Amino acid sequence: MSAMNEDAVDRIVAQWRREMPDLELDAMAAFGRIHRVSRKVGDRNHAAFAEFGIGRNEFDVLASLRRSGEPFTLSPKQIGASLMLSSGGLTGRLDKLESAGFVERLPDPSDRRGLKIRLTEAGREAVEGALRAELVILEDALSELDAKERKDLGALLRKLHAGFEDQPFG
């Protein structure tokens, strides 16, 4: 590999190979790159989302509501299941979104003790704008790959992800 194509992960792996030559380091290199790309894209998304008054966590809640379709209303339990969040983890996000005017809590007409969370027009504008900004960032991140490479990458990541599909986060 030429020094021109060498990246930070190559340098880290080379150091480990020098220090511990008996180790197989391909997995470290692959996940090191996945992690670094994810962090850089995440940082760009964070900045883009901030322009719409939300963070990643708030985007996820708003996106769950938006992609649920009209009337953009879900129960907290449905949102929590979609995001793999406990009710306690969701409450803070909902409080923040409600005070920003992005969602509203409504009584559940089919359960006197229940609530429904509805996306407001301001929330819809925020999540749609943030999504459009995110897609530009993601397209830019993949711009080094041609169509076949994108398809191959997607297939490989889908295969890798399948091994973790049913495992909880955390």
Image: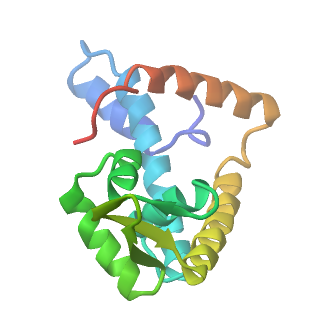
Q: Residue at x 61, y 81 (%)?
A: 121
Q: Residue at x 35, y 29 (%)?
A: 28
User: Residue placed at 43% from the left, 48% from the top?
Assistant: 36
Q: From the viewer's perspective, is residue 152 above or below residue 6?
A: above
Write the residue at 42% across / 72% down. 55
Give the x, y percent position of residue 37.
50, 48
Where 25 sits versus 8, above or below?
above
x then y, percent, for residue 14? 36, 31
Q: Measuring from the top left, give residue 19's x and y in whole percent.
A: 21, 27
Q: Is residue 131 left or right of residue 80?
A: right
22 left or right, relative to 135: left
Quadrant of the image for the N terminus? top right
Q: Residue furthest top?
A: 22
Q: Tell how many labels.
A: 0
| Front residue (pair 51, 10) | 51
Q: Nearer the viewer, residue 68 or 163?
A: 68
Question: From the image, which quarter does the C terminus lie in?
Answer: top left
Decide: is 77 above or below 165. below
How is this picture coloured? Answer: rainbow
Q: Position of residue 30 (x, y in %)?
A: 44, 30
Query: Splitting the image into 4 quarters, where does residue 168 fall?
Result: top left
Q: Is residue 36 left or right of residue 52?
A: left
Q: Quadrant of residue 68?
A: bottom right
**Relative to 139, is 148 above or below?**
above
In front of the other: 41 or 161: 161
